[in-house]
Amino acid sequence: MNSPAASAPPPEPPRARRSVRWLLWGALVALLLVAQSLLVGLTLSYEESRAQDRADAVAAAASGEMRRLVQRSLQSAQSLTWNDPPPTQWHYDAQEMLRQRREFLRMELRDSDLKVLNAVETPFRSPVFSTMARSDLEIEMHPACATARRVASPQFSRSYFVPQAGGLGLEVVDLCLPLDRAGHASGYMIATLALGQLLEDAANAAGANDHELSLVEADGTRLVRAGPHRGTGVFLATRLVDLPGNSLQLRADAVQGRPGLIPNLTLALVVGLSLLLFGLVVVLARDVRRRAIAETALAEALAFRRAMEDSLVTGLRARDVRGRVTYVNPAFCAMVGFDAHELVGCDPPPYWPPERIDEYRRRQSERLTLTRDLAAQREGFETQFMRRNGDRFPVMIYEAPLLDRVGHHAGWMSAVLDVSAARRMEELSRQQQERLQATARLATVGEMASLLSHELNQPLAAIASYATGSLNLVADAEQQPATAADTVSMLRQALERIAEQAERAGRVIKSVHGFVRRRERSREAIGADLLIEAVLPLVRLQARKSGTRIEVECPKPAPRVWADRTMIEQVLLNLTRNGIQAMESEATPLDRRVLTLRVMQPHARWVHMTVSDCGPGIAPEVAARLFTPFFTTREEGMGLGLSLCRTVIEQHGGALDFGPATPNGQGTEFRFTLAVPDPARHAAERPAE
Ligand SMILES: Nc1ncnc2c1ncn2[C@@H]1O[C@H](COP(=O)(O)OP(=O)(O)OP(=O)(O)O)[C@@H](O)[C@H]1O
Ligand SMILES: [Mg+2]
């Protein structure tokens, strides 16, 4: 937590951040795709090169075997001509040879003109030239024999096709060996070899089970094939098999086709791993997406919190469990005039007035030792802070415990309200109230002045006449000294009357003086009867003018009340005056003009005082505005009486209301309550008067 002033660099705009994130993800997926494709491609090409190598190896091995077999056949054929055996011997040897070597199909002994002298067929099959005459298939043999004679060594003819029964045929090659006798050409031995058999033997010897072997001509025409399976024509290897007088091409054709994606184990592994990798990337992407959403929500919540803190007018302050400030909001900074960084971590904080640091420390340590439940009651307390310029000002603080993420008590959060303006207003309103009351008192006195003068006239007139009478008596006594004793006693009486009248006049003046004198607000325990007695002279003074009778009903001994004497006397005066004024009109006959002041104690803690008259009562439209200041129905009225009464009674913790004086709705009764003195509660309120 820190102040917004000490915040991090401005965050990247969310849209830009989102597109960068998408770009990174796109790049990652693309890289993975390329890497996976390369891996699969490499695996496939490795497989292909292995298959091609195998085809090459098979072709090389088979061609080697072929060469070896041909060489062996050549040697075998030559062995039949050694030492120029007699024809019967040759016949026998040839038969034996044909039995042992299956590649030989037929042996012929011919004279130097290539006429057949002797021929032996293989015992393993029907004679090879049974479908077509041998003489018709000698065309390849002749050039071979001619070459053999010229070079004096065995020569192979070009291969040719010999049709067989049932539409089949054999590809054969003739081996022509020139025979000499005593240095002269004596004939030829022709051995016809089955190329298919040779190739079969070579394939078996080379162990080429998974390849199809073929002998092909230079133009690609296939002559024979061998092998259990057909080749697919994908992996081909060709080797040249050189024979004397002829050369053949041996081609190995792998049975295996182009490597597929699925049946290959390595490939399956690679593909499986790739899929797994992609799955992981997808899961990761989802997780990152969830995180991004949470991040956005958090950022929004933070922004909202910051906006809320900035818009608050209430100061917020957080403290850790040791009482050090850990956070303040802008409103708090504005209130005390310090920056957030000047407040965070400071002990004691600079807004504590220096003269009250000890007191505040004591209070803080008490506060910090409170249990969380007690502290959670959030009762505010008022204290004083100091602004940067040294001004002291009152604040209201509401504190609540601060819990961390796991619910541990981590400190305190306080809402701080600057109440200096409210206090100023209160003081202003108090002063205004006092001024208003003083004004009202003066107004009342002004109105009473005429009554007073009338009332004072009587004692003064009496005093004057007694004084005149006394002077006459003194004059008589001077002329007739004999009556001096009577004169003295009459003078004494006259002087006593004068003193009485003067005292009466003084009482009237004193009651008014006591009322008008502005006293400090002070409450005391006072008997309700004394309050009434204090106002009675003035009330009677006013009542006399309209012929109103005053009645007082008060239990004996009278209950005591906790009140500001002057204020309550003023309330009583206002209410009695209103009652008397209400009865002054002709609507109330003289004999019914009675004003009753009553005291009751319905509850141990409360006293009721009522002022009831027999006037015309209060109309509903008047009743609605009765307590509104300056509302009056009288020409000479100010309309302040009742409003002041209510303020005074409410200040005393009581209530003022009104209603009809009698159950049948006649007259008006104003009632108010006052508290009975409570020694425990009121002792503290009793100031030094
Ligand atoms: N006992 C009563 N009977 C009938 N009407 C009354 C009674 N007391 C008050 N009122 C009405 O309430 C009005 C307001 O009374 P209030 O005492 O506030 O002002 P006021 O008497 O007119 O003037 P002042 O400020 O001089 O007292 C009066 O004008 C009167 O109409
Ligand atoms: Mg009045």
Image (tube, rainbow, N blue to C red):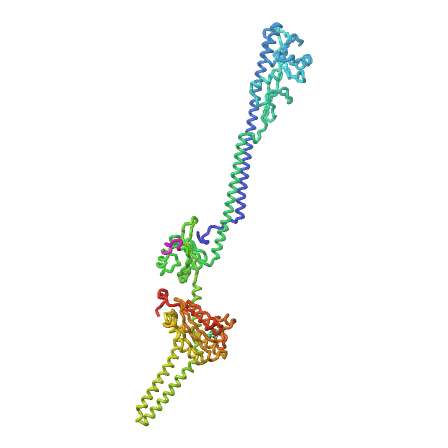
In the image, 170 versus 151, the foreground residue is 170
Indicate the position of residue 118 as horizontal and vertical percent values: 64, 8
Find residue 531 and report its image quarter: bottom left
Q: Is residue 518 left or right of residue 246?
A: left
In the shown orientation, is residue 373 left or right of residue 173? left
Image x and y of residue 39, in percent:
54, 33
How many numbered discs sit on the rendered protein?
A: 0
**Is residue 407 something one can see in this rendering?**
yes
Task: Please say if 574 is above or below 103.
Answer: below
Question: Does residue 86 belong to the magenta stretch?
Answer: no
Q: Is residue 371 magenta?
A: yes
Foreground pick, 168 / 376: 376
Say which quadrant the C terminus sits in: bottom left
Nearer to the camera, 591 or 486:
591
- Give percent across and percent down for residue 681: 37, 65
* 427 up-or-down from 349: above or below: below
Q: Which region is colored magenta?
A: 366-374
* Residue 342 visible in the current orientation: no
Q: Residue at x 61, y 26 (%)?
A: 232
Report whether 545 appears left or right of 80: left
Work out whether residue 552 or residue 140 is closer to the camera in this orientation and state it.
Answer: 552
Q: Residue farthest to the front?
A: 664
Q: Is residue 508 left or right of residue 205?
A: left
User: Dominant secondary structure of the magenta stretch?
Assistant: helix
Expressed as whole percent of the image width and height from the top left, the position of residue 507 reads 38, 79
